[in-house]
């Protein structure tokens, strides 16, 4: 039986670039900390590290292998108040 991750974060590069160009158009933003670490910060107040596997397909596959996952159901960060 395959091992499935049913909520796997991804941020398509085009979305990350659009958010960097106009962060007011999104309900989440990417922040860079003092030592260069990046994290995703949502308007609702929660935040998490911006892991490479969120934006790089090859890194996603490597992370899946490392975690023993056969299938990932992708949960993309695509929402924007302007898109609703």
Image: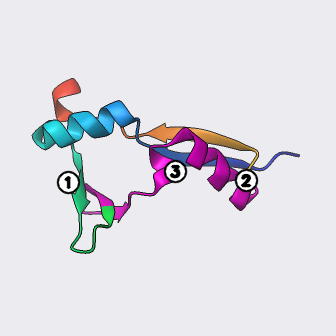
Residue in the picture at 65% in, 45% down: 61
Q: State the SS at label 2.
A: helix
Q: Residue furthest front?
A: 36
Precedes in sequence: disc 3 or disc 1: 1
**Which-is-in-front pick, marks 2 and 1?**
2
Residue 78 coordinates in the image, percent (x, y): 34, 34
Q: For the residue carrying disc 3, how many other residues have a C-alpha within 10 Å: few (<14), some (14-19), or many (20+)?
A: some
Residue 27 inside the magenta-drawn segment = no
Residue 23 seen from this side: yes
Q: Give the CA distance from mark 3 to mark 1.
A: 22 Å
Disc 2 vs disc 3: Cβ atoms closer than 8 Å? no
Give the residue number, with chain letter if any, for mark 1. 43
Q: State the SS at label 1.
A: loop
Give the residue number, with chain letter if any, for mark 3. 53
Q: Is residue 24 left or right of residue 72?
A: left
Residue in the picture at 39% in, 57% down: 50
Q: Give the CA distance from mark 2 to mark 1.
A: 32 Å
Disc 3 vs disc 1: Cβ atoms closer than 8 Å? no
Q: Residue furthest right?
A: 1
Q: Which residue is more in the foreground, 25 or 13?
A: 13
Query: Which residues make up the magenta segment?
Result: 39-68
**Which-is-in-front pick, marks 3 and 1?**
3
Above or below, 52 relative to 55: below
């Amino acid at each position: 039986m395959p091992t499935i991750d049913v909520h796997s974060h991804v941020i398509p590069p085009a979305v990350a670039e659009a958010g960097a160009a106009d962060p007011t158009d999104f309900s989440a933003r990417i922040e860079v900390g003092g030592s260069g670490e990046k994290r995703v910060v949502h308007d609702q107040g929660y935040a998490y590290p911006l892991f490479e596997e969120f934006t790089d397909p090859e890194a996603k596959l490597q992370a899946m292998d490392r975690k023993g996952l056969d299938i990932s159901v992708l949960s993309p960060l695509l929402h924007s108040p302007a898109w609703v």
